[in-house]
Image (cartoon, rainbow, N blue to C red):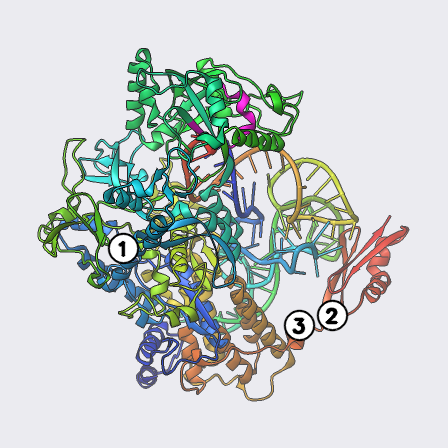
Amino acid sequence: MYLWCVMQQTSDPVRDVYDFKTIEPKWQAYWEENETYRQANPGDDDFDASKPKRYILDMFPYPSGAGLHVGHPLGYCATDIYARFSRMQGFNVLHPMGYDAFGLPAEQYAIETGVHPAATTKKNIANMRRQLKMFGFSYDWQREFATCTPDYYKWTQWIFLRLFDCWFDATCEWVDTKGRKTLGRARAICELRALLDEAQSDINEAGEIVSGSAKTTTRWSALDDKAKDSAIDACRLAYIDEVPVNWCPALGTVLANEEVTNDGRSDRGNHPVFRRPLRQWMLRITAYAERLIDDLKLVDWPEPIKLMQRNWIGRSTGAEVDFPIASGGPGAPMVEDFNAWQTERSNVDSGGGFARVADDSVIRVYTTRPDTLFGATYMVLAPEHDLVARITTPEQRDAVDAYVRSAVHKSDLDRTADTKTKSGVFTGGYVYNPANGERTPVWVADYVLMGYGTGAIMAVPGQDQRDWDFAKAFDLPIIRTVKPPDDFDGNAYVGEGPAINSGMLDGLNIADAKAKMIAHLESTGQGCGAVNYKLRDWVFTRQRYWGEPFPILHRADGTMVPVDEGDLPVELPAVEDYKPTISNDEDHLPEPPLSRATEWKTIERDGETFARDLNTMPQWAGSCWYYLRFLDPTNATRFCSPQAEAYWMPVDTYVGGAEHAVLHLLYARFWHKLLFDLGEVQTAEPFQNLINQGMIQAFAYEDSRGVNVFLDDVVERDGAFYRKGDDEPLQQIVTKMSKARRNVVNPDDIISQFGADAFRCYEMFMGPLEASKPWNTRDVPGVFKLLNRIWRLYVDPESGSLSPAMSSAPADEASLRMLHKTIKKVGQDIHAFKFNTAIGQLFEFVNHMTPLKERSREILEAFVLLISPFTPHVAEELWSRLGHNGSVSKESWPVFDESLAKDDMVEIAIQVMGKVKARIEVPADADEKTLEDLALANASIQAAIAGKTVRKVIAIKGRLVNIVAN
RNA sequence: GCCGAAGUGGCGGAAUUGGCAGACGCGCAGGAUUCAAAAUCCUGUUCUGGCAACAGAGUGUGGGUUCGAUUCCCACCUUCGGCACCA
């Protein structure tokens, strides 16, 4: 207001045009000063418990040095509009923002420059905060935090300790706080020990408590203390295991799959990469696989995203089957007599039966098609499989060793790139097919993956195309066990049909044959029905500096103790050098940057020396639970107060990019379920509604050589594009924004040219939120003009006072109807996240009002409220110029009158044989009979049906009439 | 290869989910205003033919269901995103 007065005094004649450069900073300062968007928590003095709540959350950004690109604010604009709208509708709205601040780029920068990642991150956050404020987002800034601060990661470590301190009791049936029956839950590890001690239960190698006496189980009471500890450790939800990783000694670090090139080298520096097992922290997400699938039923997510999660978890049903080893290498345990083995297995009561964990004398496979067992003509082991070494005969040893070595050194991509050509080597060993006792050769091939199922398959070339290809390549027998249709001319037949060549199964359809075979396997102790998941446990270790340290202390003897909760956080120490230790030796073990923290890395406790864990957690860790910290970000005694959690959770609306559809959302759901099992949170699922914004793409221009030309150097003439100056024709393509494409649009530039309100409107007007669509700066002036036109409805640019056309007389009916229609449409569209059509309606309103000589003030006042979620700055300015005190955001959303929101007369089409021949104006509620009569009486229609017989008339109220005549 | 999403004017897109295809915006054309321009306002703008009224075609392609299909079904083509031989 002050600046406006100055302008009025100094410029003559006064031109009080829409001046976003003054308005936007002015109101941003006002919001900041008045804490306009602060949201009180339950228990606070100014908390209004009578209001319903909405928790509206954005996926928080990584504070990169490049700042926000135009893709970030797409989702942020959407949630901001929805949050402002929700407040006006009388909701308590939790709308926070923070930073996912641990991560690789800051560390890479530190390695190159020696600048501490904390300093880089702090600087980047400051820039990003400036940008976020520049957009006018209504975040509650008092709740802002970054995941890299000790106050925050203290609780990340605390949750890790919960994972460490729990096991998953898969057989536990329980009723949750919402009264739902659930199978399986996390329980404290001390309960496991108590169960084992008291109940004299047994524990098997899979870490399952078992009663009964299957032969691979061990009597708990027979174990010594150390063996008990390690058995317990193996059951934890956070456990240590050896898993193969992409080890790059020259970089001194482990690489992600996407950092490894096809020829098995690092994409940074082109160093050799080796796949080798490494001791890693693992999180047992697989224990929750079933519940992660089931509980998708509880959330309102887009079906495609749910489908992607289901596919990722990849539940399949089938059977595990044991194939006894008939012959192999010198040391291999063997089954001499197949019939005797079968008899022994069948005798369940005297130590036979199907063991929970396979013994050495069999190859255990998982199959989804137990009905095809009679067609299993060879076996395949993954190259990493334990049995490979033992089953290989001396004659085949060299070939197998060479094959295994080459496969192990291949990257995943390389190993799986070519799906047509199969490679593999015969081990020389044989197993018996348990269905018919046939001696079946055992091969090793890299198309079988150790990470899925049991790492071994029975190959059924008749019903599996991959097996068919392999059998053809190596001249192995093929037996069809499902009868294909007579006209079938393909290779493997995977369709439905009666079983053939399958003894007792012959004639059965696939489902019945599966069931019968599983029953047979179970009754004879040779196999059992099984469920399998593609999902694997989560490798939770990174050999990095810039992440959360593990709150675990290691004794010299290999045992571990958790850091006391009272000693959290385990703070990340300062180091001189952030580089991992590099080496040219493939066998050199990783030494993460934290090994350079010489003071920190050992610690004395009660006279005993412990080594700290030198690894850090992955970036996912911080983002797994940040939505809970926003509820109560400064709580020093708990990750958040139970009261805040009970009130705010679940997140009602979660908006972010579809690229997080699987990993982030699955990991966060997993952690949430752990906290739920422990009674720390009250909802089974964290995110009730999920919306995936599309990607903002950009036009890019290529010359004839395929080289990209900078946007600024492109001119358009007659719909074609040319390079400025040399008139070379360019090809326009739509692609991701990237530096390489030279088509990056910076939001700072757009805002300095058109303002934040116009920017927000443009992004929302581009198209549906979920769709990917190209940015086109050419279109921005369209919404910028809208704001100017709105401005002129209120402000007379000559005098700077309110427009003389604004009248206090009662509104004309047409304008009143337009207003109510607009209130209805905009409200409904915001609620449905259809912002593009909401803005279309704002245009229609302005188009209606602009030509009027006299405009009702009452209507214009209501319209300011309607635009305020989209264009908060200009709305505040107009609201204040209309003489109101206080922020427009504190006003209520206007209520529409249904009778005014719809037209009383409508135009309907009259068709003859589906072609429109006339249009008539009728009352909106005219019934079908009236429409039919009016249609038949219409002159053009009579002409159109002259000489024809009217067969049928279809009249749809308020829509159309169709006359069938011939 | 598999899974998912999508294909509508010169461009971004709309269409109550089976009921007038092209709302709204951009661009373009014409007009008003102006000494002139910018800005602003008004009019037109799917394509083809016609001065016009009007006629015909038209939502990736080809079929089908229906009085009626952008919408539902079948086959195919193209683009984008994800996954990588998942037994």
Q: CA distance from mark 1 to mark 3?
A: 49 Å
- Above/below status of A160 relative to A532: below
Task: Kindly tell me whether residue A281 is visible in this rendering.
Answer: no
Give the camera-side residue of A810 and A189.
A189
Estimate the x, y position of residue A5 in percent, counting from the top left.
33, 85
Estimate the x, y position of residue A811 in percent, counting from the top left.
60, 84
Does dot 2 land on a helix, a strand or a loop? Answer: loop
Estimate the x, y position of residue A227 in percent, counting from the top left.
26, 41
Q: Kindly identify which numbered label has been placed on residue A924.
A: 2
Does dot 3 land on a helix, a strand or a loop? Answer: loop
What span is colored magenta in the figure?
Answer: A364-377
Residue A927 included in the magenta stretch of the image: no
Residue A375 included in the magenta stretch of the image: yes
Query: Circle 3 marks a residue in which chain?
Result: A
Q: Residues within 10 Å of mark 2 (few under 14, many from 20)?
A: some
Query: Circle 2 marks a residue in which chain?
Result: A
Please tell me which of labels 1 and 3 falls first in the chain.
1
**What amino acid is labelled 3 in the image?**
Lys
Q: Residue drawn at (57%, 78%), measured in percent from left and top?
A: A895
**What amino acid is labelled 2 in the image?**
Ala
Please tell me which of labels 3 and 2 falls first in the chain.
3
Q: CA distance from mark 2 to mark 1?
A: 56 Å
Q: Kindly identify which numbered label has been placed on residue A182.
A: none
For disc 3, the marked residue is A902
Q: Are marks 3 and 2 in contact (CB under 8 Å)?
A: yes
Does dot 1 land on a helix, a strand or a loop? Answer: loop
Left or right for A697, reference B41:
left
